[in-house]
Image: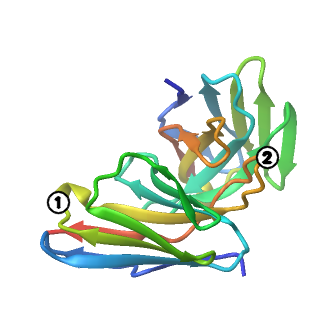
Amino acid sequence: DTEVTQTPKHLVMGMTNKKSLKCEQHMGHRAMYWYKQKAKKPPELMFVYSYEKLSINESVPSRFSPECPNSSLLNLHLHALQPEDSALYLCASSQDRGEGNYGYTFGSGTRLTVV
Amino acid sequence: QKEVEQNSGPLSVPEGAIASLNCTYSDRVSQSFFWYRQYSGKSPELIMSIYSNGDKEDGRFTAQLNKASQYVSLLIRDSQPSDSATYLCAVNAGNNRKLIWGLGTSLAVNP
């Protein structure tokens, strides 16, 4: 299995809603990532988990809350978002052996619209 | 400020030609270099990784790395209309889990 699966594929939420994005991989990767991508821009790193521990938080607002329940799952909890948070949210995973970066495998993304 | 620069394009080539995409980076300690392809509305897909100076070939794709000059390039031989996409260059930032991304080059292959 060489896929990263993200659900849902599309999400429309109001500014007072609480929702969660889910990501699953079964490639044995021990590093998992959340990225945000706006149109015609490169992906923007939000969070990195390594061996189920949060290792990088790129000063993301607290209305985004990540969670890594186990080595295969990654969630992103959303609360009180703003319209400018509308974007494609990408999950990715990679091997993490300390030496060398092996490149990411991205999921297909969740297209989020905040109304 | 660590930077990765790419020409935004669009780069337009006829079908069957060689497409050449270039990327320069500012951080001399960078060790890992990647090319991702992204179709409109889709997620990025890793197509090439390179870690040592020289060329690395995979099918119609060749990645070239020159650490002394701090550039990495991607050649696509026998370009096909299905190669039309945005190509993103990414470089590791010293922290093995974090990449610095270029803004991407839009490639159009014309039948």
- Decide: is B58 above or below B54: below
The quadrant where residue B66 appears: top right
Report helix, strand or loop for mark 2.
loop
Residue B74 in the figure: left or right of residue A55: right
Give me the residue at 79% from left, 42% from top: B50
Q: Mark 2: few, some, or many residues within 10 Å (few <14, many ≥20)?
A: few
Query: Which numbered dot is residue A99?
Result: 2
Q: Chain under label 1?
A: A
Q: Which x, y percent locates residue A95? A: 73, 61
Q: Chain of mark 2?
A: A
Is A53 situated left or right of A76 in this image? Answer: right
The residue positioned 53% from the left and 28% from the top of the image is: B3
From the top left corner, tell me how far across and down residue B62 is, in percent. 79, 44
Q: Write down the quadrant of residue B41 in the picture.
A: bottom left
x then y, percent, for residue B99: 58, 43
Q: Looking at the image, which residue is at 59% across and 54% down?
A: B37
Closest to the observer: B19 or A74? A74
Q: Is residue A15 above or below residue B87?
A: below
> Where residue A85 sits in the image (x, y, percent)?
25, 58
Q: Is residue A86 left or right of residue B71?
A: left
The nearer-to-camera label among 2 and 1 is: 2
Q: Give the amino acid at mark 1.
A: Gln
Residue pointed to by mark 1: A82
